[in-house]
Every structure is written in structure tokens, then in C-alpha cells.
Image (spheres, rainbow, N blue to C red):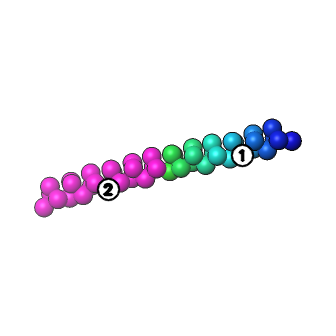
Amino acid sequence: MIKRILCSVIAVVSWTSLTLLLGNACIRAQTTDYRREAQLLTKKF
């Protein structure tokens, strides 16, 4: 029983950390894209 609880807790923690890491990566990619677009727009003007 204790092992099952521990395994489930570890699984949940690892999943949440993975999703957070992926989410951060996606946000970073989006922000870099926006920055590039902003730089291109400022260069045009």
C-alpha cells in the first residue's frame, strides 16, 4: 500500500514538473517569436 501511494505521488510530481517545463519552453518560444517580430517591425519603420 505504502509503495503504491509513493509511486503515485512520484508519478504526479514528475508529470506536473514535466508539464511545467514544457509550458515554460512554449512560453519562452512564443516570447522570442514576439520579440523577433517586434524587432522586424521596428526595423521596417
Is 26 covered by the magenta stretch? yes
In the image, is 3 to the left or to the right of 16?
right
Look at 72% across and 46% down and name the residue there: 9
**Residue on which disc 2 sits:** 34
Q: 14 or 36, which lies in front?
A: 14
Q: Which kind of residue does numbered mark 2 sit on?
A: Tyr
Give the side of residue 39 with respect to residue 19, left or right.
left
In the picture of the structure, the residue carrying the numbered disc 1 is 9
Residue 26 versus residue 7: which sits nearer the camera? 7
Q: Quadrant of the C terminus?
A: bottom left
Majority secondary structure of magenta residues: helix
Residue placed at 68% from the left, 47% from the top?
12
Within 10 Å of disc 2 (Cα), the crowding (few <14, some 14-19, many 20+) is few
Residue 37 in which image quadrant: bottom left
**Tag 1 and tag 2, C-beta contact below 8 Å:** no
Instruction: Find the distance from the CA under tag 1 to the CA under tag 2.
Output: 37 Å
In the image, farthest residue toward the front? 2
Residue at figure coordinates x 79%, y 44% from the top left: 5
Relative image position of residue 3 (x, y in whole percent): 81, 38
Q: Which residues are magenta?
A: 24-45
* Among numbered discs 1 and 2, the one appearing first in the sequence: 1
**The N terminus lies in quadrant:** top right
Q: Residue at x 20, y 58 (%)?
A: 41
**Residue type indicated by callout 1:** Val
Q: Secondary structure at mark 2?
A: helix
Q: Position of residue 10 (x, y in %)?
A: 69, 42
